[in-house]
Image (tube, grey):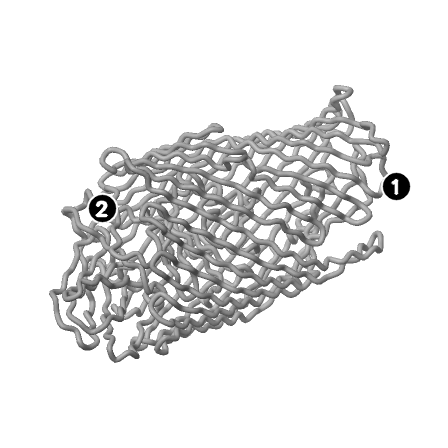
Amino acid sequence: MTKKITILLFSIFLSNTLFSQKQNNPNEISISGTVVDAISNQPLEYATIVLKDVISQKISGGITDADGKFDIKSPKGTYEIRVEFISFASKKFPKQVINSDLNLGTIKLSEDTSSLEEVVIVAEKTTVDIRLDKKVFNIGKDLSIRGGNASDVLGNVPSVQVDVEGAVSLRGNENVTILIDGRPSALVGLNGAEALRQIPAEAIEKVEVITSPSARYDAEGTAGILNIILRKNKLTGFNGSLQLDLGYPARVGTAFNANWRTEKWNLFTNTGFRYNETPGNAFSDANYLNRSNTEVARTVESRNFDRLGRSLFTSFGAEYYISDNTSIIGNIVFNGGNDDDVNSNDILRYFNDGNIKEATSRTENEAEDEERIQYTLDYVNNFDDKGKKLSINLQYSTEVEDKLNNITEFDTQANLLNDLEQVLEDQDENRALLQIDYVHPVGEDIQYEAGYRGNYRDIFNSFYLEERLVFPNGPLVPDAGLNNSFNYEEFVNAAYFQYGQKFNKISLLAGLRYEYTAIEIVQQTSTTRDERSYGNLFPTLNLGYEFKDGENITLGYNRRIRRPRGRSLNPFPSRSSEANIYTGNVDLNPVITDAVDVGYLKRWEKFTLSTSLYYNISNDNWERIQEATGEITDNGDPITRRFPINLSTEERLGFEFTLNYRPFKVWNINSDFNLFRVTSDGDYTNPTTNLTQSFDFENTSYFIRINQKITLPGKTDLQINTNYRGPSQNAQTESQGVFSMNLAASKDLFNEKASLSVNFSDVFNSRISQRTTNIPGFLNQYSEFQWREPQFRVSLVYRFNQKKKKFTPERQENGGEDFEG
């Protein structure tokens, strides 16, 4: 049976707050109620309520919030009311004269088994849900990420930037906390950028961008929180999809997601495999200004990265409905990877007169094995249909990373082996979590919430290097100055309380969170132990005021923390090359940030505009100092050292807007612009040279993203994504702007049961980081880095027991079908 699903996404801010609104206009009435699943009694979020004025034939309506509730304001009149939800049978209320507020009570919808073959794939549309304390981006038919990974997904989310090296930032600030299903997870990994590349895009349902977190969230992450929600389908029967990917440079992948649901059980899985080659390159030209202890005046390096990655991601879960109101969910996620990389580095060293001192070729053969496993058990009890709820979450996860790197260096002029090294690295992490949340509403307009979270982390890192000192046949000798084992344990106990209330057009959500942190640092090589503990209060406040339907303003305040961990604390040196050493600082203190955010949302017939003005101030902010050590390598290169210290006060002031414009039915434009200014105040004195360097700087930068989707004849879609990140600087480094463009197209096949898509990333081969570093009296260096060269991908998606179904919006005041508020 074919039926028309009408999506009317207006008044979204009000629909998704926790509370219903009182009426002030005597000519308006309120139509309210709660929509739930008839079998599980679970609330149905995004159910559509359609109001049809039988006299004027005008269509209006709204959608339900996360608790399945709706509260729609409308003029007095005679209406037909229809309640719909994807894959569920509609419920109709006959026409009636409504002159006063009407509460329809609890509306139970049953799944429409007769139309199972026409089940809508929930992710066919990408929508934006704006709430009082966050924005929710439901990942849909974004062609540019098909066959990609979590890093590609985040790169297309407004307010989020993913740089050339894979570092994720929110509004230009890299100190962002990334959660999986609302919780810290080993799936993000010790190396966040690399771990995100192991999660296939097809496993992600939505991303929550939380720039003004409420008290229920961890206080970690001074920029805010990105919460990645993995798919957990709940459609009746057995259904799913299979995806195959091919690409150049060599890329083969597959993704399978399915679920099987009965009256009491729901089983779901997401599984993906990737085999891909990822070539990259780098270049640097370093001029040494102080040549008192070295003959090397200049070093030029050209690097090529030939990476071969294999990864398997699988998630399997089961949900059991104990009763109409209670369910328990168990989930196991496994993520394994095996990489073989060959990195070559050609180095030219020059005398002061410009003649070549030495030419070498350095090759690193690195093998890496990764394994991440996460076990989750969730208990949910919805006591009634008024929002009273208890949730208990248990989670345990492990991560293991092992690296073996064999390094050889040849003198290309003499054709002699002059360096042989072997590096072994082992990184392990164990996490455990217990979280309890309780929500208690009072009446229609007040809600209380309280909870506890305990986070435990145990991180172990060992570094072992041995090097041949006597050529040609000498033994490999361990480097006692570098080899070490380091263990970090952290236990954070947190409790929170928050209060929410609706005052006519004003929404209030205020909370207080307390976190007590206890850490233990054991340097096993030097047999030293450091312990510390500290407690912090984190107040939060979120206010919203609605001028009218489709226009509102929000104000948010919160306090956040950035805790030092692992590598930032380990005082033993580690190195990225012979001439570049990094050491941690065991005395590093956490950074506390206070943040204020003012947002404004306005909708017109073809436009949706969301803006924000934000200000952050961080005291005892970390600065990573880069300085000369006074030592040189065997090749005569001066050795530099980088390390973090609590040095400066940092202030961030920024403005961003997200604009959706749909000039025609077949053309949709989404743009995201962020302008921010960073100022830092701090001085550092080198204890060796006794020279003082000012770390005061002002940096104004911006980024802009424009995504266009065009629907062509023959059920073909074209997507054009362009990004530009403006130039930026800090006290020691200036970075040039980076422009990139991705193209993608998709065509439906086999009566819309399948889709074939192609994707070309970095069309102009311009996604290259270019930087200039200046250390007064020591170094001036220009460098380039391209982590991934342009790629071409082809993906085929086949849906079984599902059929793609078009949405037919009956009014377009939200400004578009793909990104909506």
Q: Residues within 10 Å of mark 1 (few under 14, many from 20)?
A: few
Residue placed under numbered mark 1 in the picture:
292
In the image, taking residue 214 as reference, residue 326 lies left or right, namely left
Q: Quadrant of the C terminus?
A: bottom left
Whether residue 174 is visible, yes or no, is: no
Instruction: Find the residue positioned furthest to the top.
Output: 415
**Mark 2 closeness class: few <14, some 14–19, many ≥20 residues within 10 Å:** many
Alpha-carbon distance for marks 2 and 1? 74 Å
Q: Which kind of residue does numbered mark 1 sit on? A: Ser
Identify the residue shown where x is 69% and y is 41%.
Answer: 575
In the image, residue 372 sits, relative to residue 320, either above or below, namely above
Q: Nearer the viewer, residue 359 or 430?
A: 359
Asked whether disc 2 touches disc 1, contact meaning CB atoms under 8 Å apart, the reply is no
Side (left or right) of 585 relative to 711: right
Query: Is residue 613 rendered to the left or right of residue 130?
Result: right
Which residue does the image show at 58% across and 58% down from the upper left?
A: 676
Disc 1 is placed on an element classified as loop
Camera sees residue 357:
yes
- Give how far across and how far down residue 373 sits, in percent: 44, 45
Q: Position of residue 5 (x, y in %)?
A: 22, 53
Q: Position of residue 308 (x, y in %)?
A: 52, 30
**Which of the marked residues, 2 or 1, is nearer the chain's N terminus?**
2
**Where does residue 342 sit, x and y in percent of width and height?**
59, 29
Name the residue type under label 2. Val
Residue marked by disc 2:
119
